[in-house]
Amino acid sequence: MTQRKDIDTMRRRRDIDGLVAALFEPEEIVRQTAAEALGLVGDERALEPLEHLKFSDSDAGVRRAASVAHAQVAARLAARKAAEGIPRES
C-alpha cells in the first residue's frame, strides 16, 4: 500500500508507473496527492488515467485534483509540441 510520503519520492524520481498505480489506492489523500504529483511531472502517460479519475472517483477532492493535473499535463504537452513546431490536434 502506497503511503502519502512515498508520492514525493516517486515524483522526484519521475516514477510515472508508481504514481499512476497510486491513483487506485483506497485512501483519498494518496490518490489526490498522486494526481497532483502527476500534474507536476507532466508526462503524457498520465493523461488517460487522470482523465478516467477526474470523472469516476468517489471523492470530489480527488476528482478536482485529477482535473487540474490533467489540464497541467495537456498544457505542457501542447507547449512542447508548439516549441517543436508540431501542429496541435483538433
Image (cartoon, rainbow, N blue to C red):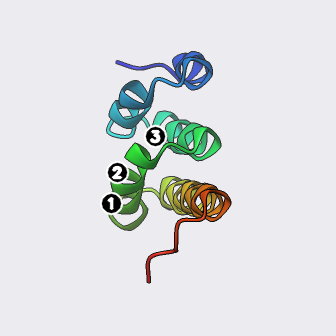
Q: Quadrant of the C terminus?
A: bottom left
What residue is at 50 percent from the left and 42 percent from the top? 43
The residue tagged 1 is: 52
Q: Earlier in the sequence, mark 3 or mark 2?
A: 3
Q: Earlier in the sequence, mark 3 or mark 1?
A: 3
Q: Amino acid at mark 1?
A: His
Q: Amino acid at mark 2?
A: Pro
The residue tagged 3 is: 31
Q: In the rendered view, does 89 fall on the left or right side of 86? A: left
What residue is at 53 percent from the left and 66 percent from the top? 86
- Does the rendering let one see residue 36? yes
Q: For mark 2, does the 10 Å Cα neighbourhood hold few (<14), some (14 to 19), or many (20 or more) residues?
A: some
Q: Where in the figure is residue 6, as x and y percent of width and height?
A: 53, 16
| Image marks 2 and 1: residues in contact by CB distance under 8 Å | yes
What residue is at 44 percent from the left and 48 percent from the top? 44
Q: Secondary structure at mark 2?
A: helix
